Amino acid sequence: MADDIKNMIPEEELPEGIIELTDEDGVVSQFEYLTTIQYDGAEYVVLMLIEDDAEDDEEGEVLILKIEKDPETDEDIYVTVEDEEVTQHVFEQFIAMMDNEEE
């Protein structure tokens, strides 16, 4: 599946809360796990891209991916969300959750 992004590194080799993903082109990127959000019967993971050259006061890039099961291995895979409405709704839930935590 071209839209699948798989976690190819065993979790014990990465710092807690850090996920390393390999995209369909073989490019490896590290993300900080922020939360998992339920929406419309599905689960979505919210990740923030970890960039080496990002300044501390800059907002990071947030990535929202749908969590599905790989039919061959039964492991979780992260799939690109094609529906912009779904992405927007999940992002709004994430922002509301962050606002509640700050109060």
Image: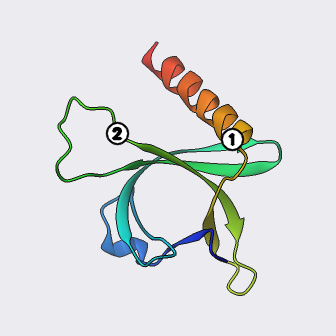
Disc 2 residue crowd, few under 14, some 14–19, many 20+, Cα 10 Å? some
Query: Tag 2, which secondary structure?
Result: loop
Residue farthest right in this picture: 41
x, y percentage for residue 87?
65, 41
**Amino acid at circle 2:** Gly
Q: Is residue 83 above or below residue 26?
A: above
Q: Measuring 37% from the left and 73% from the top, which residue is drawn there? A: 12
Query: Tag 1, which secondary structure?
Result: helix
Residue identified by numbered label 1: 84
Residue farthest bottom in this picture: 72
x, y percentage for residue 13?
32, 74
Residue identified by numbered label 2: 60
x, y percentage for residue 96?
58, 22
In the rendered view of the protein, which quadrant contains the N terminus?
Answer: bottom right
Dot 1 or dot 2: first in sequence order is: 2
x, y percentage for residue 75?
64, 76
